[in-house]
Image: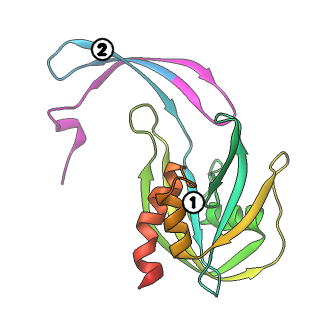
Amino acid sequence: MFDPNHDPLHEATIGSELLFEGKAVALYRDRVRLPDGSEGVREYIRHPGAVLIVAQLPDTRLLFVRQYRYALRRAVLELPAGRIDPGEQPEACARRELLEETGYRAGVWQPLGSMHTCVGYSDERIDVYLARDLIEVGAEPDDGEFLEILSLTPDAAEQAARDGRITDAKTLSALFLALPQLRG
């Protein structure tokens, strides 16, 4: 089994400083021992983790949300997703987020894998689930969350990814994981 502490590229932490702690993330600056023995500095974001749901309706269309992303100063088309609460298991978070964002519950849940969104500066991990046998029960959005719900066929979703209408990295990665199963 691979041991990251014995990896010749491993960087050992010498010291760590918390620069900022917010509601969603914490920013750190660490001093590290580099593989050649010299010292370096690494700044990175700690994130509690998140989930993303590829939710497929009985007619095979996929549920998407369109929401304003302040950092980009525009609305973005993405698959439903959300941050894991302290002590919450990923699948429980996925069930909660699907209901909150889309108003659907799923009868069948399948883990598709996980991803790290920005490995150069964040430890964020997103667990991806395929949700099927959907039943609409009514959305319960978080306070301050404003969404439009859309649906696309798997082919239309792939085309939206290829033509630049979908630019969200987590959505692109999840479609890559899910499309073979959605078509199989």
Residue 137, above or below 69: below
Q: Helix, strand or loop at disc 2? A: strand
Position of residue 41 in the picture relative to residue 100 (left or right): left
- What secondary structure is found at the residue carrying circle 1? strand
Where is residue 50 shown, x and y percent of the image?
57, 51
Looking at the image, residue 150 sits to the left or right of residue 170; the answer is right
Q: Which x, y percent locates residue 173?
A: 45, 57
Choose mark 1 or mark 2, whichever is in front.
Answer: 1
> Residue 44, image x and y in percent?
46, 27
Q: Amino acid at mark 2?
A: Gly
Q: Residue at x 26, y 26 (%)?
A: 11
The quadrant of the picture occupied by the N terminus is bottom left
Q: Which residues are magenta?
A: 1-27
Q: Residue at x 46, y 45 (%)?
A: 117
Residue 165: image location, x then y, percent: 58, 55
Was residue 25 drawn as part of the magenta stretch in this picture? yes
Left or right of 115 in this view: 98? right
Which of 118 and 113 lies nearest the eye of the viewer? 118
Residue at point 54% right, 19% down? 18
Q: Is residue 62 magenta?
A: no
Tell me the kind of residue under disc 1: Leu
Badge 2: residue crowd in 10 Å (few <14, some 14–19, many ≥20): few
Residue of label 2: 40
Q: Nearer the viewer, residue 78 or 105?
A: 78
Residue named by callout 1: 52
| Residue drawn at (66%, 79%) of the image | 106
- Quarter of the image with the C terminus is bottom left
